[in-house]
Amino acid sequence: MIQQFVDQNSNSQNLEALVLRAKNGDEIAFGQIYDLYFQKVYRFIYFRVNHKEAAEDLVSEVFIKVWDKLDKIQEAQAFNGWIYQIARNLVIDYYRSRKENVDISLLENVLQYEDNMIDRTNLSFQQKAFLENLGQLTEEQQIVIKLKFLEELDNPDIAKILGKSEGAIRVIQHRAISELKKILKYEPR
């Protein structure tokens, strides 16, 4: 547990150093940021647009925007939430530009990868049950749980992406977990 905290803190400091170097025009540092975030951002976008080429194009746009606007980021530790916010906005723009009749508020819930994820990975019975029952939560709860546990984002980043306070995210998360426990009839040992 302590080692995990040390590793996470070290990774955070490394990211902050990379962001600061990239802000000063260091292309190698930006390349390292790209390497750290490409798969995460691609997965985040792909599961929302369900189209490989569109996801690749949008990921490219994300990193172009990040490079162009990197000097505007005030605090390097806010980078994680900031890059996901850019990705989210580009997904919304993608649907708007296609002029499809899609409810923008539902875009965050377009993730239809749980079934594929269950088939592709070797998950425990409890993890499979968790993913299969996620659809019984409210849309807001699903979004928070997916960002927290599938995208592995921290509460401050989720709050920034969804435009809510960290406290609100904690409440939504707590209620979602409580509801999932009821659904799964979880009984602590």
Image (spheres, helix red, strand yellow):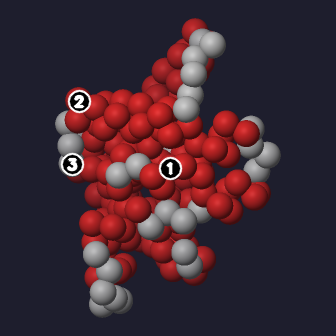
Q: Earlier in the sequence, mark 1 or mark 2?
A: 1
Camera-nearest label, 2 or 3: 2
**SS at mark 3?**
loop
Taking the spot 42% from the left edge, 37% from the top edge, the residue there is 179
In the image shown, does 153 or 9 lie closer to the viewer? 153
Vertical arrangement, residue 132 with respect to residue 60, above or below? above
Badge 3 amino acid: Gly
Vertical arrangement, residue 125 with respect to residue 30, above or below? above
User: On the rendered image, what quadrant is the C terminus found in?
Assistant: top right
According to the picture, the residue beneath numbered tag 2 turns out to be: 167
Estimate how packed mark 3 is, as few (under 14), some (14 to 19) or many (20 or more) residues with alpha carbons within 10 Å. Answer: few
Taking the spot 49% from the left edge, 63% from the top edge, the residue there is 111
**SS at mark 1?**
helix
Q: Position of residue 102 (x, y in %)?
A: 32, 80
Residue 159 seen in render: yes
Q: Position of residue 52 (x, y in %)?
A: 60, 77
In the image shown, does 167 or 46 lie closer to the viewer? 167
Residues at discs 2 and 3 in contact (Cβ within 8 Å): no
Q: Position of residue 106 (x, y in %)?
A: 33, 67
Q: Earlier in the sequence, mark 1 or mark 3?
A: 1
**Horizontal arrangement in the rendering, residue 132 relative to residue 110 (left or right):** right
According to the picture, the residue beneath numbered tag 3 turns out to be: 163
**Horizontal arrangement in the rendering, residue 40 relative to residue 147 (left or right):** right
Residues at discs 1 and 3 in contact (Cβ within 8 Å): no
Q: Which mark is residue 134?
A: 1
Estimate how packed mark 1 is, as few (under 14), some (14 to 19) or many (20 or more) residues with alpha carbons within 10 Å. Answer: many
Q: Which mark is residue 126?
A: none
